[in-house]
């Protein structure tokens, strides 16, 4: 078995285990590095979303082990798939048994702003203070949440690293179809239609390409990739859902038309057969799997989880191309929504001081730099001093250096959850995924699907306000 095929086999085993776990009520993948009684006050319970490689999880365990030796405390890690983190965390809270610390991408978009508003999180301003001058302004603003109980905003999450959506494709498949990277259009419609032509060309050439798809778009309810991509489409069409005070703008007729157009645009690729039929059921790892199995020519993805999986096979790694998004339909450069992997500390934690000590250790520049490099650069650093490491700008590593270019030189913005916690419910319910499925499965028009989504979003915000929630300006 070749190195490439062996790595693909290992990846499939990992993904199958992730999918199995995501569908189970017992989503715990690993609990380590110790297994003491939960009543042990010297034990910190940490919930962290599982990495896409063994190396990623091992790097975290080594980091934790170093802190344990210094502190005299133990950390009990529970890994969940990132799809399962929101549900499992809320169940633990309802059972009165939350972790001390929660870390996860989906927690940032679906949970943390609400938990802060409800008074369920500990103010971590003192943790952030140790490296506050190293955080970019927009990163700090993204974790500056409102607490209804204290009636003020503060830092209720510790930013660890960030990511944004980019596009991965196979260079050799592009060459097989008769094109090179320089042939890829930079305009919005030209760019996406190009991949349709690559699919048509490959399928016309050889039997082995009869089932290949040009676009690895996700349309499911079970994957955050669905709303990550759709939020990027809304951004491309300049559809602004909330103002700077966190107030809804969807009663604006232009906003409504933008939502309709975005849904119609995204759904049509599936309807026309340029995205896999099973993409309406995908979980987050499935577009990775399909691309690595060469069932796709390209796919958008929100981290470098695809390239880090094949990083040790340099030949295959170098066949994988990475692209920025094309210019918006109006010709202007894309503005990228960014996601944070952040740590929050629950108010019910019995080990708040020790947990804060661990988080303070975790975000020290050398500790975070060593960890991020050990996991192959899947996550981009938020600390400016760590970004200066040559690892992140190495021109021979196009995957890592391309993401560095996007997140340091292009326009970015946080998700709307930082403006109003109510929007986290919209993402948790995957309102955009539901709208797409209404179009693709139930055959309603994009207009009807958009109006239903708008109605649900307004209902969520109204219920939020009635329960005492409000936008609250910064």
Image: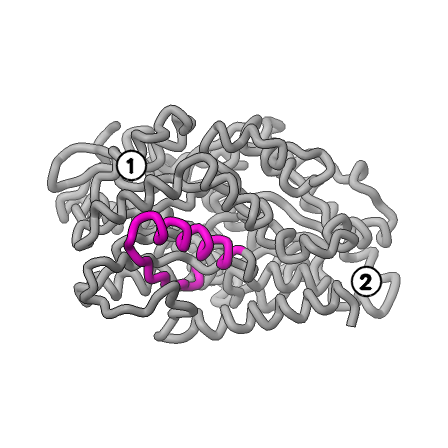
Q: Residue 328, can we see it? A: no
- From the top left corner, tell me how far across and down residue 42 is, in percent: 23, 58
Q: Which mark is residue 359?
A: none
**Mark 1: secondary structure:** helix
Tell me how far mark 2 sits from mark 1, CA to CA: 55 Å
Q: Residue 200, can we see it? A: yes
The tag earlier along the polypeptide, 2 or 1, is 1
Of the pair 432 and 17, the residue shown nearer to us: 17
Above or below for 157 versus 200 = above
Above or below for 249 versus 316 = above
Left or right? Give the position of 78 relative to 100.
Answer: right
Judging by the rendered image, the residue that carries numbered circle 1 is 127
- From the top left corner, tell me how far across and down residue 337 is, in percent: 47, 38
- From the top left corner, tell me how far across and down residue 338 is, in percent: 47, 39
Above or below for 142 versus 68 = above
Q: Which residue is at a point 68% across and 34% down the rendered structure image?
A: 394
Judging by the rendered image, the residue that carries numbered circle 2 is 203
**Mark 2: secondary structure:** helix
Q: Quadrant of the N terminus?
A: bottom right
Left or right? Give the position of 286 relative to 187.
Answer: left
Of the pair 237 and 50, the residue shown nearer to us: 50
Of the pair 189 and 423, the residue shown nearer to us: 423
Q: Is residue 286 on the magenta stretch?
A: no
- Residue 35 occupies quadrant: bottom left
Q: Is residue 79 on the magenta stretch?
A: yes
- From the top left corner, tell me how far across and down residue 439 is, in percent: 50, 60
In the image, the segment drawn in magenta is 56-82
Left or right? Give the position of 287 relative to 201.
Answer: left
Q: Which residue is at a point 23% across and 49% down the rendered structure image?
A: 115
């Amino acid at each position: 078995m070749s190195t490439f095929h062996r790595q693909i086999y290992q990846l499939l085993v990992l993904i199958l285990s992730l999918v199995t776990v995501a569908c189970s009520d017992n989503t715990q993948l690993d609990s380590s590095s110790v297994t003491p009684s939960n009543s042990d006050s010297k034990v910190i319970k940490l919930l962290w979303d599982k990495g896409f490689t063994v190396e990623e999880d091992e790097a975290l365990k080594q980091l934790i082990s170093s802190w344990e030796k210094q502190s005299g405390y133990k950390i009990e890690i529970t890994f969940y798939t990132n799809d399962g983190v929101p549900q499992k965390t809320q169940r633990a809270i309802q059972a009165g048994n939350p972790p001390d610390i929660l870390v996860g991408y989906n927690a940032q978009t679906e949970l943390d702003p609400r938990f802060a508003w409800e008074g369920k999180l500990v103010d971590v301003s003192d943790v952030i203070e140790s490296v506050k001058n190293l955080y970019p302004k927009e990163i700090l603003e993204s974790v500056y949440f409102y607490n209804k109980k204290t009636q003020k905003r503060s830092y209720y999450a510790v930013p660890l690293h960030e990511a944004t959506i980019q596009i991965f494709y196979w260079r050799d498949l592009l060459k097989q179809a008769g094109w090179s990277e320089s042939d890829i259009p930079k305009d919005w419609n030209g760019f996406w239609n190009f991949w349709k032509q690559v699919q048509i060309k490959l399928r016309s050439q050889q039997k082995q390409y009869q089932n290949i798809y040009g676009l690895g778009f996700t349309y499911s309810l079970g994957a955050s990739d669905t709303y990550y991509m759709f939020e990027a489409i809304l951004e491309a069409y300049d559809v602004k859902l909330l103002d700077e005070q966190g107030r809804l703008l969807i009663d604006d007729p232009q906003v409504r038309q933008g939502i309709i157009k975005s849904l119609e645009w995204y759904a049509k690729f599936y309807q026309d057969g340029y995205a896999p039929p099973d993409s309406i059921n995908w979980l987050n790892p499935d577009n990775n799997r399909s691309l690595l199995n060469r069932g796709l020519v390209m796919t958008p993805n929100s981290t470098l989880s695809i390239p880090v999986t094949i990083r040790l096979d340099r030949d295959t790694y170098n066949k994988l191309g990475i692209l920025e998004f094309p210019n918006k339909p109006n010709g202007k450069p894309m503005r990228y929504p960014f996601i944070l992997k952040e740590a929050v500390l629950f108010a019910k934690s019995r080990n708040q001081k020790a947990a804060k000590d661990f988080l303070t250790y975790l975000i020290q520049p050398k500790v975070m730099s060593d960890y991020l490099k050990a996991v192959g650069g899947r996550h981009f650093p938020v600390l400016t001093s760590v970004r200066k490491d040559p690892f992140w700008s190495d021109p021979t590593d196009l995957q890592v250096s391309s993401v560095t270019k996007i997140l340091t030189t292009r326009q970015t913005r946080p998700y709307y959850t930082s403006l109003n916690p109510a929007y986290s419910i919209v993402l948790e319910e995957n309102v955009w995924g539901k709208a797409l499925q209404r179009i693709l499965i139930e055959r309603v028009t994009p207009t009807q699907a958009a109006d239903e989504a708008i109605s649900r979003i307004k209902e969520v915000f109204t219920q939020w306000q009635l329960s005492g929630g409000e936008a609250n300006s910064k």
